[in-house]
Amino acid sequence: MKFIFKAKNVEGTIKEGIIEADTRDAAAVILQKNNLLPILLKEETRSSEVLKDLSRIWEGVSKKELVVFFRQLGVLIEAKVPVTSSLMAIAEETDNSYFRMIIKEIKDDVDDGMALSEAFAKHANVFSPLIVNLIHAGEVSGGLQSAISFVADNSEKEYYLTSKIKGALYYPAFILVVAGLIGFLVVSFIIPKITIVLKDFHTTLPWYTQVIMSISDFLAMYWWVVLLLFVVGIGSFYFYLRTPDGKRVWDEQIFSIPVVGRIAQYIFMARFAENLGILLNGGIPVVRSLTIVSNIVGNGVFRQVALDAAEEVKKGGNMSTVFARSKHVPHLVSQMVKIGEESGSVSNILRNVSSFYTQEVDGMTQNLTTLLEPFLIVILGIGVSILVVGILLPIYDVVGSMGA
């Protein structure tokens, strides 16, 4: 059970936090062993847990907030500020109420004698296994500040890489959504009013005009059905992707999408190599490093590559053997890793691989944005042309025949 406590230390300072124990008396004994005199000690209610869960859903913790957190923590520890004092100072400056609760819980756990990495591990939805293991390696080696800076650098790279991809796709996505919405409104509500002229004269119309009018009449009557089906379809697809089967299918098929598939491959390759290189450089054994990477790479295909490589290493083989068998790992990477295994510099090779593919992603996203602009213009032009040729020209012909 968890108990919320307020206690006073030997210096008279009030301490607040959460402690785990089997009973209330056991919690009081733990506090006393840590030279704390309990003032208030009550069991954490279910409503507190629900409030925390709602706060997590509403706010969560963004990658940017993690970057700022580790940068601040690294600076404070480098300045010889105690870990608990550093965590409290950061918590007080954090605007995110959910993240503030997490930091304070970590601070309380460290106060109770728990290692910083163990305190992070309790919040797996915020701190990945990569972060936990790097911090643990820093604690063991006595280089905690370096490990924290390492985590901050890695989180920052991940944040900027993700931001570039989102930035490249937001603009075309926004244009397509707006264009689709406007097209739906035009076909459903505006074209039926325009085509009244054509219907009144009972003239023979081109087949494409008749098709447009039929679609327009249907949408004018049943637009709400079409809109409902669209929303249900998007929602069903979204929830399907969140199921194990849906995620597996998406992780495999994303690489088949033209242009986007190549960018996705390079993104996951860069993330895979970067995280594996960091773990190996931090002294984490190869098998454990591969297992950790499999849980944080974010793609089922590369996850399986990591797990297969871990099994191969357990048998006395090399990672490069598994990499060479995968069609999603570029041949260049498997060759470079093989050289690294032979020379004993796998971590450095992997960092170079990550840097190379990060630059490739950067260039491809810039080119993608440049190429999408004329493509979007062509799509919009086609839509306008269909409207002009299919509706406006027939109306012009009818009006012209009346004048004749």
Image (tube, rainbow, N blue to C red):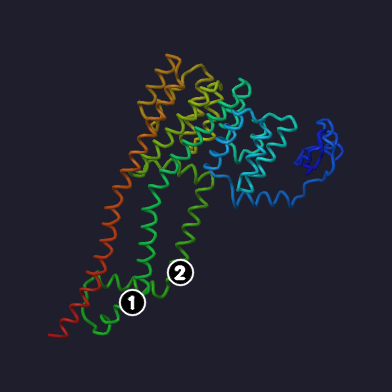
Q: Position of residue 332 (x, y in %)?
A: 35, 26
Question: In the image, what residue type sits under mark 1?
Answer: Pro
- Determine crowd level at label 2: few under 14, some 14-19, many 20+ residues with C-alpha closer than 10 A: few
Please give the residue where the numbered disc 2 appears in the rendered image: 225
- Determine crowd level at label 1: few under 14, some 14-19, many 20+ residues with C-alpha closer than 10 A: many
Q: How many marks?
A: 2
Q: Please name whichever residue, 116 or 43, is drawn nearer the observer in this view of the structure.
A: 116
Question: In the image, what residue type sits under mark 2?
Answer: Val
Q: Quadrant of residue 74?
A: top right
The residue depicted at 57 percent of the width and 32 percent of the height is 75
Q: Which mark is residue 44?
A: none
The residue depicted at 37 percent of the width and 67 percent of the height is 184
Q: Furthest-left residue in view?
A: 404
Q: Is residue 22 above or below residue 290?
A: below
Please give the residue where the numbered disc 1 appears in the rendered image: 192
Q: Position of residue 162 (x, y in %)?
A: 45, 42
Q: Earlier in the sequence, mark 2 or mark 1?
A: 1
